[in-house]
């Protein structure tokens, strides 16, 4: 359980932040950048949830995703050396079942949508636009995490999760656009 009694600690005033286990990194370090971008994606999903007119199954799905993204932040904030611990002391890691759940939800939602013959511009409804922005931020989180993985050990399932999450958010944006009826399709070269 996380316990936050004090919000400011002054420990980051020197331009560093702490990882799980106590090591410190510069705030511009790729691991910290990955954590921060995951947090940004989570925040945008929170904004998208505020655009929902009623509490629907999609809201429940997005709430689960928000919890997953906190798991992912903990995963990224825990250096791989901590993986030697087991049981209650084992680090929190994203697992395959979280990716599989997203895949099942994508498949169920996408089965109800007509196929696309063009790319979709972000927009349509307020909810769809917010989901598209969450998708774009998730893609950035994926890129930063992949860059980190080139330099340090990263849970590969974390990268899979981010990749699948961006797909899920895209499909959900189409659902939010009246099952694709309000999608704004790209018209290549229309302004030439």
Image (cartoon, helix red, strand yellow):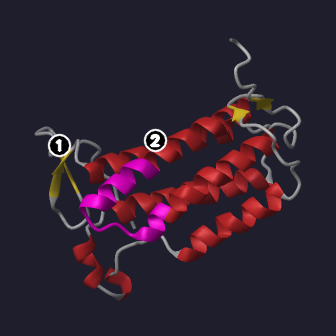
Tag 1 near tag 2, CB within 8 Å: no
Q: Residue 40: x, y in percent?
A: 46, 41
Q: Residue 10: x, y in percent?
A: 16, 41
Above-or-below relation of 8 to 56: above
137 in magenta: no
Q: Residue furthest left?
A: 14
157 in magenta: yes
The residue shown at (39%, 70%) is 155
The circle on residue 147 is none
Q: If the image is split into quadrants, where does the C terminus sit?
A: top right
Q: On the image, numbered disc 2 is attached to which residue? A: 40
The residue shown at (73%, 68%) is 104
Q: Residue furthest top?
A: 192
Above-or-below relation of 160 to 37: below
Viewer-proximal residue, 42 or 115? 115
Dividing the picture into quadrants, the one containing residue 57 is bottom right
Q: Residue 118: x, y in percent?
A: 77, 37
Q: If the image is split into quadrants, where does the N terminus sit?
A: bottom left
Q: Residues within 10 Å of mark 2 (few under 14, many from 20)?
A: some
The residue shown at (27%, 72%) is 80
Magenta span dominant secondary structure: helix
Residue range in magenta is 142-159
Residue 4 in view, yes or no: yes
User: What is the secondary structure assignment of the residue under circle 2?
Assistant: helix
Residue 54 in view, yes or no: no
The alpha-carbon separation of the residues under discs 1 and 2 comes to 19 Å
Q: On the image, numbered disc 1 is attached to which residue? A: 12
Dividing the picture into quadrants, the one containing residue 7 is top left
Image position of 179 (left or right of 81): right
């Amino acid at each position: 359980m996380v316990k936050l009694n004090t919000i400011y600690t002054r420990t980051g005033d020197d331009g560093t932040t702490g990882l799980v286990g106590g090591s410190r990194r510069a705030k511009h370090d790729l691991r910290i950048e990955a954590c921060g971008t995951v947090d940004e994606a989570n925040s945008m999903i929170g904004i998208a949830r505020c655009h929902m007119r009623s509490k629907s199954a999609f809201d429940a799905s997005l709430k689960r995703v928000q919890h997953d993204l906190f798991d992912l932040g903990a995963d990224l904030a825990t250096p791989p050396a901590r993986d030697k611990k087991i049981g209650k002391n084992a680090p929190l890691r994203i697992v395959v079942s979280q990716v599989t759940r997203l895949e099942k939800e994508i498949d169920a939602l996408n089965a109800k949508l007509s196929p696309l013959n063009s790319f979709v511009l972000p927009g349509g409804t307020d909810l769809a636009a917010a989901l598209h922005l969450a998708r774009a931020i998730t893609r950035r989180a994926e890129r930063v995490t992949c860059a980190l993985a080139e330099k340090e050990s990263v849970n590969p399932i974390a990268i899979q999760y981010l990749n699948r999450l961006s797909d899920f958010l895209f499909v959900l944006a189409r659902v939010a656009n009246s099952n694709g009826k309000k999608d704004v399709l790209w018209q290549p070269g229309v302004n030439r």
